[in-house]
Image (cartoon, rainbow, N blue to C red):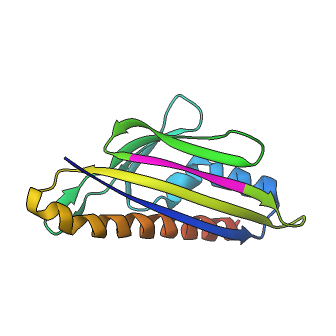
């Protein structure tokens, strides 16, 4: 089993008040809708907890069936944090810091680190690492884009 990881950070502004931005980015239905390539998403009994199963993805003959359970919560008035609970083959950890930028705009500083456990043949491990890292970064960037698009539709 090989573990691959990637991190993505972005600071951006959305054209909604801080309360609306915080509610949108912490809403499990929005997260599941925008996560990308989700086979299933299930809210669990613990508030703020979502089990995500991704559609299989194949690169260089290696298929990844992603699954993890993650918990989102505000640890203070302005910081949303999330972390996987260790079940599954994906680990996600991150935070989004919300700062008002006037009455109708919100600045968001977003950082996410994701790691994946994959069954990879020994000879492919070095080749597939950079591909997986790039896909993680691109996936988080695309997720944020979908979240912003969904917010602008409301």
Residue 95 within the segment the image draws in magenta? yes
Give percent across and percent down for residue 88.
33, 40
| Residue depicted at 29% across the width and 69% down the height | 130
Q: Is residue 70 left or right of residue 87?
A: right
Where, by quadrant of the figure, is residue 9 drawn? bottom right
Report which quarter residue 58 is drawn in.
Answer: bottom left
Taking depth in this image into account, of 106 and 37 the one nearest to the observer is: 106
Using the rendered image of the protein, determine whether residue 153 is visible from the camera's viewpoint.
no
Which residue is located at x 70 percent, y 54 percent? 97
Quarter in which the C terminus is drawn: bottom right
- Left or right, 119 with respect to 43, comes to left
Residue 5 colored in magenta in the image: no
**Residue furthest front in the image:** 126
Which residue is drawn at the image coordinates 57% and 58% (left, top)?
Answer: 111
Instruction: Locate residue 110, reporting x and y percent.
Output: 61, 60
Residue 14 seen from this side: yes
Q: Position of residue 42 (x, y in %)?
A: 45, 41
* Residue at x-position 43% and y-position 70%: 138
Image quadrant of residue 36?
A: bottom left
Q: Which residues are magenta?
A: 91-97
Q: Predominant secondary structure in magenta?
A: strand
Considering only vertical position in the picture, is 13 above or below 26?
Answer: below
């Amino acid at each position: 089993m090989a573990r691959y990881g990637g991190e993505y950070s972005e600071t951006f502004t959305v054209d909604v008040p801080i309360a609306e931005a915080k509610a949108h980015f912490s809403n499990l239905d929005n997260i599941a809708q925008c996560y990308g390539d989700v086979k299933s998403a299930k809210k669990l009994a613990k508030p703020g907890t979502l089990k995500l199963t991704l559609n299989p993805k194949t690169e260089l003959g290696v298929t990844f069936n992603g699954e993890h359970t993650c918990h989102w919560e505000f640890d203070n008035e302005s910081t949303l944090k999330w972390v996987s609970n260790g079940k599954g083959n994906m680990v996600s950890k991150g935070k989004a810091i919300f700062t008002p930028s006037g009455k109708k705009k919100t600045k968001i500083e977003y950082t996410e680190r994701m790691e994946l456990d994959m069954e990879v043949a020994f000879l492919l491990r070095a080749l597939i690492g950079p591909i997986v890292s790039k896909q993680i970064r691109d996936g988080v960037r695309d997720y944020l884009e979908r979240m912003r698009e969904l917010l602008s539709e409301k």
